[in-house]
Image (cartoon, rainbow, N blue to C red):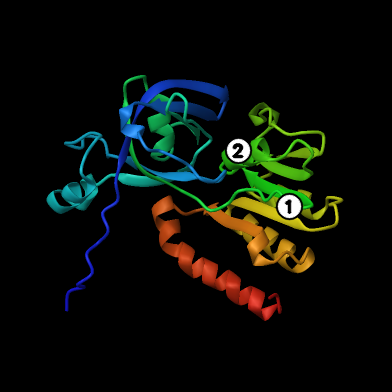
Amino acid sequence: MADPTPRRRRTPRTGTVMSTTRPTPHLVRVVLGGDGLAGFAPEHTDSYVKLLFPPPGAPYTAPFDLDEVQERLPREQWPSTRTYTVRSWDAAVGELTIDFVVHGDEGVAGPWALAARPGDTLQMFGPGGAYTPAADAAWHLLAGDETALPAITAALAALPADARAEVFVEVAGPQEQQPLPGGPGVRVTWVRRGRAPGVALVAAVLGADLPEGDVQVFVHGEAGAVRELRRFVRSGLGVPRERMSVSGYWRLGSTEDRWQAEKREWNAAVEAEEAGLGVA
């Protein structure tokens, strides 16, 4: 029997490329603006958007009706969806900034960002999100790789001037480091990536002399590393779920489409592991 519940239609937004810059060798910063972003209002420092990239040669460009595309065209002509964190939103001028980690012609979003020019358009859904640093936490632990850096930057900018935070960011090398906001209580540790993503990040966090007291945790990045760090903050630091924002943004060896399909099962396995360890 057909499902009588109609599928909720999401309202798409279309951003127009205003400018692009290269803050680091493997990063393209794209500023989007235009009337198509009217009503865009992120509520969290870890806000994200779902970007839609038509395949090469697609018979449509942004703005387009996704439902119509999926009904009318074969699957190979559907747009690819990629999730990106909002680096910043300037409500005064209506401009959205997104950072793209690029590795030449690898992937979908990176090559688009490399080729983007003012006037190009990009369709998206969002913003979504759930994490904002709590003002009443004694200190904050923020850890991740380049994919988490926009959210970490936004979180640090939102902290009070006297906040205490321990920040760990894994990057390819010193040339990928960026200036980060924060007062005198913010300590940033840049971690150089080894052969496998996340291994050095986990080692840095586990080996650090961390403060005591009520901590709020933000850990995002490669799924394997995130799982190790989640185990540490749950059983080692005793952090309750409501004080955590911990998620695998991506997984080594998986495309985003495949990872999104696997993620629910992965989360269930992590929850089962915690239950087995007796972590409430």
Q: Is residue 262 above or below residue 109?
A: below
Residue in the image at 70% along x and 65% along y:
231
Instruction: Say left or right for 159 vs 39.
Output: right
Could you tell me how many numbered marks the image carries? Answer: 2
Instruction: Say left or right for 239 vs 79.
Output: right
Residue 101 in sight here: no
Q: Quadrant of residue 229?
A: bottom right
Instruction: Say left or right for 209 vs 103.
Output: right
Q: Marks 1 and 2: which is nearer the front?
A: 1
Instruction: Say left or right for 239 vs 21.
Output: right
Q: Which residue is label 1 attached to?
A: 136
Query: Could you say whether the residue bearing mark 1 is in a helix, strand or loop?
Result: loop
Q: Residue 178, which numbered label?
A: none
Residue 156 in sight here: yes
Q: Quadrant of residue 25?
A: top right
Residue in the image at 59% along x and 44% along y:
148
Q: Residues within 10 Å of mark 1 (few under 14, many from 20)?
A: few
Residue in the image at 47% along x and 26% along y:
92
Label 1 to label 2: alpha-carbon separation:
18 Å
Q: Position of residue 95 (x, y in %)?
A: 44, 27
Q: Amino acid at mark 2?
A: Ala
Q: Amino acid at mark 1?
A: Asp
Q: Which residue is label 2 attached to?
A: 154
